[in-house]
Image: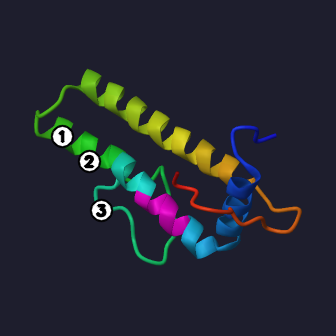
Amino acid sequence: MYDYLSKVEQDKIAVFNNDKVLFEAIKKVILKGVYSQGTLSPDKPANPMLNAALGLVAQTQNGVIANERLGEDLRAFFEGAKMVEVGFAELAKIKSKEEVVEPSGNVAI
């Protein structure tokens, strides 16, 4: 199913998935670049639909961007957040069914 991942990589992801706090923390770090504007908070799950749009709407009120540009930017924010969310949903599906395999030797080479 995940032919682009080695058994070791799948096992490491499965271990990562077992730590829900770490999973959400990593998700927050990745999503910050997509939609932050002060919307991420400690100890709360990331919500990709929260607040990036409000910052853009505020810019239209000040005449910084036109309504057409607002629509383009909102679509881009949505698509970016959706792609990250799809990736994390796919990541969460990886579960270890066997004993975890540790890499042998230097995996960086």
Q: Secondary structure at mark 3?
A: loop
Disc 2 and disc 3 in contact, CB within 8 angstroms? no
- Can you say whether 92 is above or below 63 in the image? below
The residue stretch that appears in magenta: 24-29
Disc 1 and disc 2 in contact, CB within 8 angstroms? yes
Q: Nearer the viewer, residue 50 or 2?
A: 2
Residue 31, percent from left and from top: 43, 53
Q: Nearer the viewer, residue 53 or 43?
A: 43
Q: What kind of residue is marked 1?
A: Gln
Q: Is residue 46 visible?
A: no
Q: What kind of residue is marked 2?
A: Gly
Q: What kind of residue is marked 3?
A: Gly
The residue at which mark 2 appears reads as: 55
Q: Secondary structure at mark 1?
A: helix
Color style of the picture = rainbow
Q: Which disc, if any, is residue 38?
A: 3
Q: Which disc, if any, is residue 59?
A: 1
User: Is 65 in the magenta?
Assistant: no
